[in-house]
Amino acid sequence: MKKYIIAIDQGTTSTRCAVFDKQARLQAIKHKEHRQIMPHAGWVEHDALEIWNNVLDLIPECLQKASASIKDIIAVGITNQRETTVVWDRTTGLPVYNAIVWQDTRTADFMTAFEATHGAENLQKSLGLPANPYFSASKLRWILENVPGARQKAEAGTLLFGTIDTWLIWKLTEGLHITDVTNASRTFLMNIKTLSWDDDMLKAFDIPCQVLPEIRPSSEVYGEISHPVLKGVPIAGNLGDQHAALFGQCCFSPGEAKNTYGTGCFMLMNTGNEAIFSQNGLLTTLAYQVKNQAAVYALEGSVAIAGALVQWLRDNLGLIRTSDEIEELALRVDDNGGLYFVPAFSGLFAPYWRSDARGVIVGMTRFSNAGHIARAALEATAYQTADVFEAMRKDSGVTLSSLKVDGGMVRNRLLMQFQADILNIPVLRPMIDETTALGAAFAAGLASGFWSGFDELKRTWQAREQWLPAMDARTRQGLLAGWHKAITRSYDWV
């Protein structure tokens, strides 16, 4: 009888459920979108109950598609959008407010003042992060300060906080309140060296410690699911989505890196058991931790808007009907026509960290058309990746010889070729695009003995496609110079 691992991949715009076999082959996948709630400019929220109900719908659908039953499932791994903040009542099991999404900037002013008080260098040394509304702490504080009765309930021990992984595990097990080191490292509350909650930060944000989950390794048997949807199956893996993609791409050695092209764009480089603190606007984060092993660190460059820009062209401008049409529209022109699109809709992330920036389109003339806008939108993702790539080279001293890529946008061959051209290195796409889900499956499979170790996992990785650089140096330098000029035009709007 065949055995499988299930991965629940809870992302920013949708939730996926995937089933993998012993050869790490995808046997079934189902997905379901959830609403993007935007009450005010800069505010982004999700309904945590809607996400939970989507998970309950997807699991049986996925089992049916794989012709599998609960008894065929060895373990479950979970991966999730990071930083997104949920606070719920432990007695009712209901959220006290919508989940505040990582893209949300309502706490930007608070975090600017926080950095001025506590010092950017001090914060980086203890947390590995810049002071930014991106992370969970200020979102949690906002809920405690603005939802009637929330602070009193939190201090009385009746409220619980978690990122989406914590919320789903709590619901599946009916009470297990945990997170893993990768998700905890994105809260702005975990000490990057001790891997425990930082008392100074809890005091600074006025957060009662009793609302926090227990921090555990990323690959470990945490407990069994008690909900009927997968009753008795152990949850054995948990990673933030970008860490899971690094794990799924088998980047287990220092110097190996991947870039995920999703709603945002995220490049991570494994730096081994040493935390490298960036001098060039990158984040120091946890790559993963396997039970009874030392934690592995990573450098990360986070780009806020990548695939979300294509969605914006579709939904807000009506320039395309489906996201896939962006490539066809961009191919109608030979180049960007001198047009650059800086998608700083919620500020700029790495390596700039400018929450005062806003989106701009520059270089337009009467010659400019929809094709140029489409091409500039795709190129923006590649340029932002190039900025992160260069910062990573400066911090680590490692010049990457290739880049492993994954996420929905890797199916866009125009973008991938331009990425290879602008980086001047080969870009490699794996056989399985769902590397985030695969990473969660790998973590659960290691903990449950489904896979024997890293060597067995590495043998499953194969390249499906590769793109080789074909652009001359002068053209590359000219395009990057135009991009960096355009970036400065997005500053100081807020």
Image (cartoon, rainbow, N blue to C red):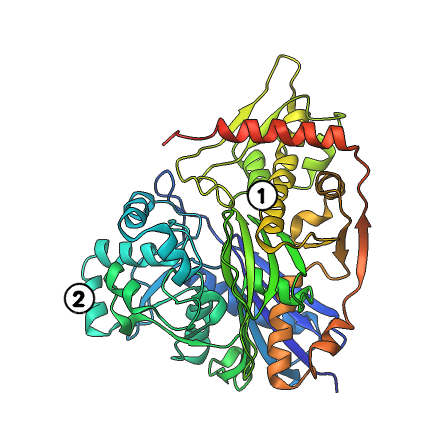
CA gap between label 1 and label 2 equals 39 Å
Residue 161 in the image: x percent, y percent?
34, 67
Residue 97 in the image: x percent, y percent?
31, 58
Circle 1 sits on which residue?
A: 306
Amino acid type of the residue that numbered disc 1 sits on in the rendered structure: Ala
Circle 2 sits on which residue?
A: 152
Does residue 449 appear anywhere in the picture?
Answer: yes
Identify whether 15 is placed above or below 331: below
Kindly identify the residue that appears in the image at 51 percent across and 28 percent down. Answer: 360
Give the position of the N terminus as an image quadrant: bottom right
Kindly identify the residue that appears in the image at 55 percent across and 58 percent down. Answer: 299
Does residue 15 appear anywhere in the picture?
Answer: no
Amino acid type of the residue that numbered disc 2 sits on in the rendered structure: Gln
Kindly identify the residue that appears in the image at 60 percent across and 75 percent down. Answer: 443
Label 1: few (<14), some or many (≥20) within 10 Å? Answer: many
Which mark is on residue 130?
none
